[in-house]
Image (cartoon, rainbow, N blue to C red):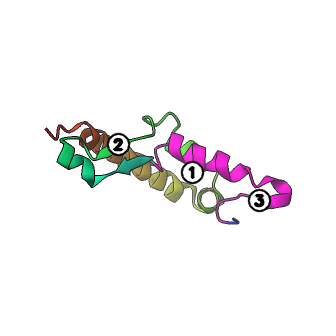
């Protein structure tokens, strides 16, 4: 995908999996499961499958062409965007964590 900076099959389609892993590690794409049937069993329906972010959002984002292009063109705007996105992802992770720890008994 041109916007993501991932090349085609000849260049190694497996790079897509590495990029997905980085998105999860940065917290940009948390992995979770939601099964409302568990509520009837007194269990929490939300299960976080990914760990807390281990990579800075900016480190992930700058590996993506769609974000690094903005960094080259408008570095001040890109920096503000990265800071805001990192704050929002941190907050979202905290909220998901709180929801996943809720007691449904």
Q: Position of residue 54 (x, y in %)?
A: 50, 33
| Closer to us: 48 or 27 | 48
Q: Position of residue 29 (x, y in %)?
A: 47, 50
Residue farthest toward the left in the current orientation of the protein: 105
Which stretch appears magenta? Answer: 3-29
Q: Secondary structure at mark 3?
A: loop
Q: Position of residue 38 (x, y in %)?
A: 25, 47
Rendered view: 100 above or below 85: above
| Closer to us: 48 or 96 | 48
Q: Residue 7: give its label.
A: 3
Rendered view: 76 above or below 105: below
Q: Residue at x 81, y 60 (%)?
A: 9
Q: Position of residue 68 (x, y in %)?
A: 63, 56
Q: Secondary structure at mark 2?
A: strand
Rendered view: 26 above or below 3: above
For disc 1, the neighbor class at 10 Å (few under 14, some 14 to 19, many from 20) is: some
Q: Quadrant of residue 18?
A: top right
Q: Residue 47: give its label.
A: 2
Disc nearer the start of the sequence (1/3): 3
Q: Where is mark 1, residue-wise?
A: 61
Q: Residue at x 60, y 56 (%)?
A: 71
Q: Say if the magenta span includes residue 105.
A: no
Front tag of 1 and 3: 3
Q: Residue at x 73, y 50 (%)?
A: 14
- In this rendering, position of residue 87 left or right of residue 13: left
For disc 3, the neighbor class at 10 Å (few under 14, some 14 to 19, many from 20) is: some
């Amino acid at each position: 995908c041109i916007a993501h900076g991932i090349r085609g099959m000849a260049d190694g389609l497996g790079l897509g999996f590495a990029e997905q892993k980085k998105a999860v590690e940065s917290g940009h794409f948390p992995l979770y499961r939601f099964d409302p049937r568990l509520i009837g069993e007194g269990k929490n329906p939300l299960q976080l499958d990914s760990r807390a972010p281990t990579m800075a959002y900016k480190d992930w984002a700058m590996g993506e062409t769609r974000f690094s292009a903005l960094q080259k063109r408008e570095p001040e705007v890109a920096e503000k965007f990265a800071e805001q996105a990192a704050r929002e992802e941190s907050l979202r992770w905290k909220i998901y964590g709180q929801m996943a720890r809720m007691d449904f008994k």
